[in-house]
Amino acid sequence: MNALSRETMDFSTVNHSVLERLCAAQPMLVGIALARDVIPGMHPHLVLHAGPPVAWENMASAMRAAVCGGLLLEGLCDTIEEAETLAGSGSIRFAPAHDHHAAGAMAGIITASMPVFIVEEQNSGLRAYASINEGLGKALRFGANGPEVIDRLRWMRDDFHPLLQAALAKVGPMDLKAMAAEALRRGDEVHNRNKSATSQFFREIAPAFVATRAPYEPLEKALRFISGNDHFFLSLSIAHAKATSLYVEQMGQGSVVTVMAGNGVEVGIRVNALGKRWFTAPASVANLKLFAGHTLDEATPTMGDSYITESIGLGAFALAAAPAIASFIGGTVEELLQRSETMRRITVGEHSTFRIPALGYRGVPCAIDVGKVVETGIAPLINTGIASNVAGVGQIGAGVQEIPMECFVKAAEALGS
């Protein structure tokens, strides 16, 4: 028996306790507020981003463009050119969103005045945060920063956020775990496909919007914004997964992965027993499904915090629940089923609540074990969108990628040292 096998056995008992804790998490949507008012350590000159730490000068072009858009939104500059100068001046601080109990899709940019969802894990009181999803196409998270993008972000902050805040206050805490479980039964994997989850949220929140007695036109615009964006629930799924991850991390034991994320330059993971330490490897571009008119040389390498959903068994680990997603990310239905089954070989067990009808209602595979990843040579899969590396273009595709094996080898070495 080699050293790694002994290490895996040593973590076996505690990893099952980690799995039980993961399944027992109770993340509830409790509100929405401006980032500066709720995110720990947030201030006007701090920009949070996806993935492991990265300096401005090393950022992928899509992330740099998103940063510039965020600085415009904050009123710290008037043009993209001024924003680029400001970002590189040293007066703006950058940090991974994960270091501040937050997470964001793609570039993951969060600035002080952006509204963020507040999700509280009820057993512990730990809170996680994620910004509102803008929709597909030209969006800040994909590196678009034109006038239409900034205008939409201002509307989301100044008009939509207060309305949604009032509606959430009327409807009370919302059980995101229950919504995710139901969405799996209805054909979502709750990462790249959120049609059912968004519909559930809309059904719950629409009467509360009406109960605010807001004027007709802003009310209609707000409701159409949610109903017209099948990815609206993605932000809630991310915050739900982050809150669950925080609850798991509170144990501080085991070889279970708690975070997987990319910044367009590096991909990194965190492991329960190793705290906030990142284990990184270069980001890459896989053979993904691109939108018509685009090629792989335009694609930004792996970027985003939304892979936190995979860390709790959703997304690529639940592909068997979402056969219709094949048309969006590529592959056949049979391949989707097989991908979910393959992930069982690198996880501690099954989720007790998240179940897949097509697999006889077996639970999704969850709690990624670093030791099993290295022993089997099977890297965790992630569902992802693809941002153009040309600023302003936005999304150019989607697909499934692997987290680099190097991340897990480094983490396994640290666990054994």
Image (cartoon, helix red, strand yellow):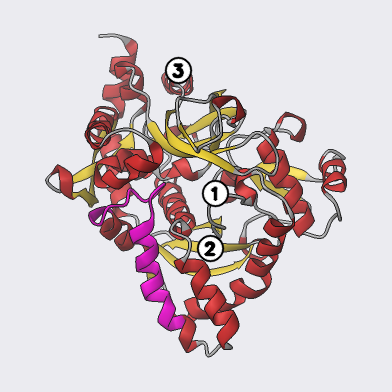
> In screen coordinates, is 256 left or right of 406?
left
Which residue corresponds to the image point at 38% horizontal and 55% vertical from the top-left? 194
Range covered by the magenta-colored residues: 184-208
Query: Along the line of sight, which residue is nearer the eye, 198 or 56?
Result: 198
Q: Is residue 276 magenta?
A: no
Labelled pair 1, 3 in contact (Cβ < 8 Å): no
Magenta region's main secondary structure?
helix
Residue matched to label 1: 103
Callout 1: helix, strand or loop? Answer: loop
Which percent across, then down, holds residue 214? 56, 87
Q: As shown in the figure, which amino acid type bears the numbered disc 1?
A: Ala
> In screen coordinates, is 256 left or right of 213?
left
Counting residues from the start of the chain, the first of labels 1 and 3 encountered is 1
Q: Residues within 10 Å of mark 1 (few under 14, many from 20)?
A: many
Callout 2: helix, strand or loop? Answer: strand
Residue matched to label 2: 117
Q: Residues within 10 Å of mark 2 (few under 14, many from 20)?
A: many
Query: Along the line of sight, which residue is nearer the eye, 218 or 242?
Result: 218
Residue matched to label 3: 413
Q: Is residue 207 magenta?
A: yes
Marks 1 and 2, Cα distance to the nearest angstrom?
Answer: 11 Å
Q: Is residue 31 above or below residue 349?
A: below
